[in-house]
Amino acid sequence: MHAIASISQSALKHNLSVVKKNAPNARIVSMVKANAYGHHIDLIDPIINHSDLLGVSEILEVEKLRKTTNQPILLLSGVIKDQELQQAIKLNCQIVIHHKTQLSIINNTKQSIDIWIKINTGMNRLGLSTNEYKYCIKLLENNPLINIQCVMSHFACADEINHPMNQSQLFEFKKSTHATVKRSIANSAAILSNSASHFDYVRPGIMLYGVSPFDIINHNLKPVMQLSAPIISIKIIKTGDSVGYSATWTANKPTTVATIGIGYGDGYPRHAKNGTPVLINNTLCPLIGRVSMDLICVDISNINASVGDNAILWGNQQLRIETIAKCSATIAYELLAGVSSRVTFINAI
Ligand SMILES: *Cc1c(COP(=O)(O)O)cnc(C)c1O
């Protein structure tokens, strides 16, 4: 009796079809970094098998992914040592160049490689400047072992549709690149909001997992991970009694309290506030008191429930993870990536 994350294969398929519907002319780099946003690489076959490329952050992730698929893989962080280049070649992945120190390592390759070049258009995290990019192209295009696949950049504020940086980054991107190279800048938010940003490759992440990149829930996307855990105790407390660590919640009337076998040790956010909804027997019930490592408490005074009944923490049309993220002052990305190894993952229809 413990927490279960069930991963819906039909929801994955559906969400990928939403990407294709929104960007019909672009190829798809599905982002599966951080163990597929916490969904587990080995439980997302519809994405693995029906994308043009799979995007990961680190070489260890490439290694893991190669055990399950021969699909093309894009390594976003690229390589900073020759030894890593050798490993990347052996694993047959495409490599992103985002910093000038990577140029000489790449340019000295003895075997042919596919590369992507990342340019900085205003996020100022990774990416070559315009001048470095020009130099990079000049240097590498004469090397017959190097195949430049695509030029990419990344939006800083795509989740805020009207943020002025979206237009300025797009302008900068178009100005620095030209139509003779393949181009890619769109993440989920840009895929859904701005077709002028789609270019040759789009890079969906969060939307594949059924989560809206915007503040508003998008009901065209279907939640992929459903997190649930059983009620392991029920007790009735009286007016004035408190619940949980630091006694942060006190009953103002006799209250039926269900204790559920999940906590921050499983990845349920410790900062979820009093009143955060938990779905039990089709009714939303409020969280009461602090989230502990293994347990949470919920006010079930208004419903019928028994020990052993299942509580859904997120991932249901009635209870989206976006709501839980808001109640705990974080984003759904962090919640998904933070589901711990104590949780049992299962493949669901
Ligand atoms: C993670 C990532 C994405 C996907 O972003 P979402 O907001 O999850 O769609 C796209 N591009 C890069 C470079 C990324 O690191």
Image: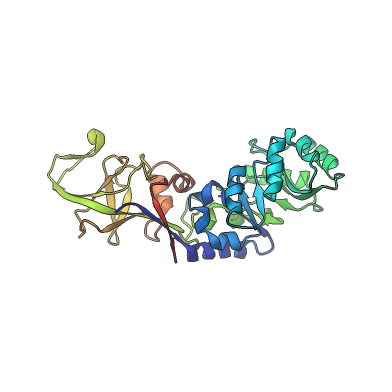
Image quadrant occupied by the N terminus: bottom left
Figure check: 73 above or below 45: above
Q: Position of residue 70 (x, y in %)?
A: 64, 58
> Is 257 positioned to the left or the right of 202 in the image?
left
Instruction: Depth check: give the residue in front, 257 or 109.
Output: 109
Q: Residue at x 25, y 36 (%)?
A: 245
Q: How is the image coloured?
A: rainbow
Q: Quadrant of the C terminus?
A: bottom left
| Residue 230 picture location, percent across and down | 28, 54
Say whether residue 70 is visible: yes
Q: Horizontally, is 142 left or right of 37 in the view?
A: right
Q: Residue at x 68, y 41 (%)?
A: 78
Q: Is residue 203 left or right of residue 116?
A: left
* Residue depicted at x 87% and y 44%: 142
Residue 340 placement (x, y as % from top left) = 42, 45
Task: Say which of 236 and 231 sits in front.
Answer: 231
Residue at 25%, 53% in the rendered image: 231
